[in-house]
Image (cartoon, rainbow, N blue to C red):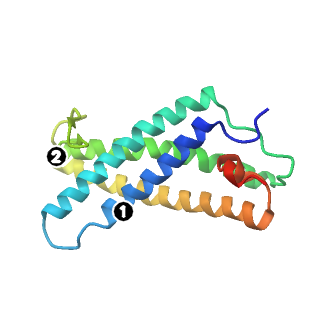
Amino acid sequence: MRQTYHPVSVLWHWLIAILLVATYYFVLGRPDTPGPSPEKLQMMSYHKWAGITVLLFSLIRIASRFIFPAPPMGADVKMPAWQNKTHKITLLLMLLLTVTIPLGGWLMSSAAGRPVVWFGLWQLPDLIGVNKDLAGQIKEVHETAAWALLALVSLHTLAALKHHFVDKDSVLSRMAPWLKK
């Protein structure tokens, strides 16, 4: 039985992690100038490209979990029941948010009348008709969910680092097999 995640699962995990960093950078790193500018529009295009890619990769990752299930925790892991439950809920919420946040962004763009053109090559179909009021409401939900995802990813990362450096167990090496002792 495997003690680490399957290499396919590891690949999707780290690709999505890198894309999430990029997605946040593209939206938070935009120039802080009033009104639209070519730089702001380009950063938003990159943000949308990364977001749609996160959506695609997350759907693939979810499907791959059925083919390559998570390995059991190692015998060296002494995790209280509340931590194990928090771990499972956090993973589930992160997977849900990596699908729903990009979908929300796509809905928001559709409602705002701004097409999503993936990598500047493929215009994705609008999911709903133009409705500026609805676009504003979706934007609020999209941003709130994005902050929630950032909090969950931070919790997930800190917990993995705590297991690796404080508990010195195999939790992190399950998804980062190159760290295996």
Which image quarter is the N terminus in?
top right
Residue 165, picture quadrant? bottom right
Q: Is residue 49 left or right of residue 72?
A: left
Q: Secondary structure at mark 2?
A: loop
- Work out whether residue 129 or residue 59 is closer to the camera in this orientation and state it: 59
- Work out whether 178 lies above or below 118: below
Residue 52, picture quadrant? top left
Badge 2 amino acid: Arg
Q: Residue 114 — which label? A: 2
Percent of width and height locating residue 109: 23, 46
Q: Residue 88 — which label? A: none
Q: Residue 25 — which label? A: 1
Q: Is residue 102 left or right of residue 64?
A: left
Query: Residue at the spot x=61%, y=26% of the render?
Result: 67
- Work out whether 19 lies above or below 121: below
Badge 1 amino acid: Tyr
Percent of width and height locating residue 7: 62, 38
Query: Residue at the spot x=25%, y=43% of the render?
Result: 119
Query: Residue at the spot x=76%, y=40% of the render?
Result: 3
Percent of width and height locating residue 61: 52, 36
Query: Residue at the spot x=42%, y=56% of the render?
Result: 146
Which image quarter is the C terminus in?
bottom right
Q: Pick whichever of labels 2 and 1 is earlier in the sequence.
A: 1
